Image (cartoon, helix red, strand yellow):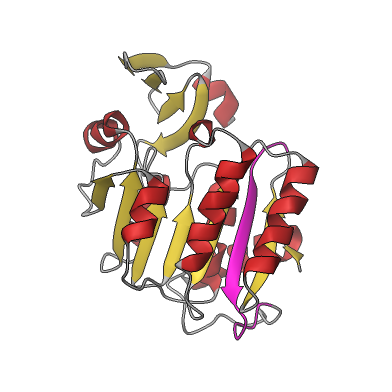
Amino acid sequence: MKLAKHVNQGRIVYLSNTKDQITISENEHYRWLAFDDVIQSVMHLRCPEKLTLPHHYATLMPLLFFQPNHIIELGLGGGNLSRFLKALQPNVQVISIELSQTVINCFQRYFNPQQHHIAVENAEALAWLQQYKKSTDWMICDVYQHHAKDFQSRVVLLTALIDNLQDNACLTLNLPDLDDQEINLCLTILRQLQNTHHIIYFHIPRYLNVIIHLLPKHWRIDNLKKRSKTTYLSSPQYLRWRNFFSHHMNAN
């Protein structure tokens, strides 16, 4: 059964009374989190670490090239990325920054059945970035876009992310609900703000998500014939992800 049919057959197990209505629904196979009726995260109940949405694969494509030890995730949601990363490599340190305490509570109660150790901080992404002074291997920005009130606020966040990006680190952006003009403007801004990284992006068919990666210039992104020794992915995973990467990538 396709995922879309599953989400039409669920029962509500949680409904918030907050301004941004948060619902959690489930059936015998999946549990999912929605903001204002827009599905944000889907967890497979038998295999909670399994990635369930195509843009999650696109988001984690840098795993083809390196083994991050320290990851900052802006926007927790249902924790799909964090669960996968901790199952893939239990020793990786993940810090997740989430604006909504309600979302954090929902994650801890409904979306972390294996009790992975994920450091979660209740904070606004921009304010947290502006005071964060330590280095990290990878920043993943997956902030719920309803909180980005206008395009200019996205630009301010992009600038703060670039300010925190070191030459050997990676930055990943999930930018849903942007039109082509806004996507091109984002890419132009990123090129102007930095010149030490490759910029590649994925436009997911039938989904609104555009995933942009800033990858260190010394990474050989055009050489994926053999499985790298610096990847956490198993050989079967590597082959599947390599094919996804080659098929969907747009490079600049």
Tell me if residue 204 comes above or below residue 139 in the rendering: above
**Nearest the eye: 71 or 19:** 19
Horizontal side of 47 relative to 163 (left or right) equals left
Position in image of residue 240 (x %, y %): 60, 62
Residue at the (68%, 59%) spot, across then down: 189
Camera-side residue of 24 and 229:
24
x%, y% of residue 138?
Answer: 44, 67
In the depicted structure, whether residue 34 falls above or below residue 92: above
Question: Quick one: quadrant of the N terminus?
Answer: top right
What segment is highlighted magenta in the picture?
206-221
Can see residue 17?
yes
Q: Where is residue 98 in the image (x, y as percent from the top left)?
A: 34, 42
Please name the residue shown 25% across and 53% down the image.
Answer: 118
Residue 216 lies in the magenta-colored region: yes
Q: Does the magenta stretch include residue 12?
A: no
Question: Left or right: where does residue 30 sit relative to residue 133?
Answer: right
Query: Can you see residue 1?
Result: no
**Residue beneath the point at 59% across and 30% down:** 2
Q: Where is residue 230 in the image (x, y as percent from the top left)?
A: 46, 82
Give the farthest residue toward the right: 181
In the image, 245: left or right of 120?
Answer: right
Judge by depth and name the residue closer to the eye, 23 or 197.
197
Location of residue 100 by image quarter: top left
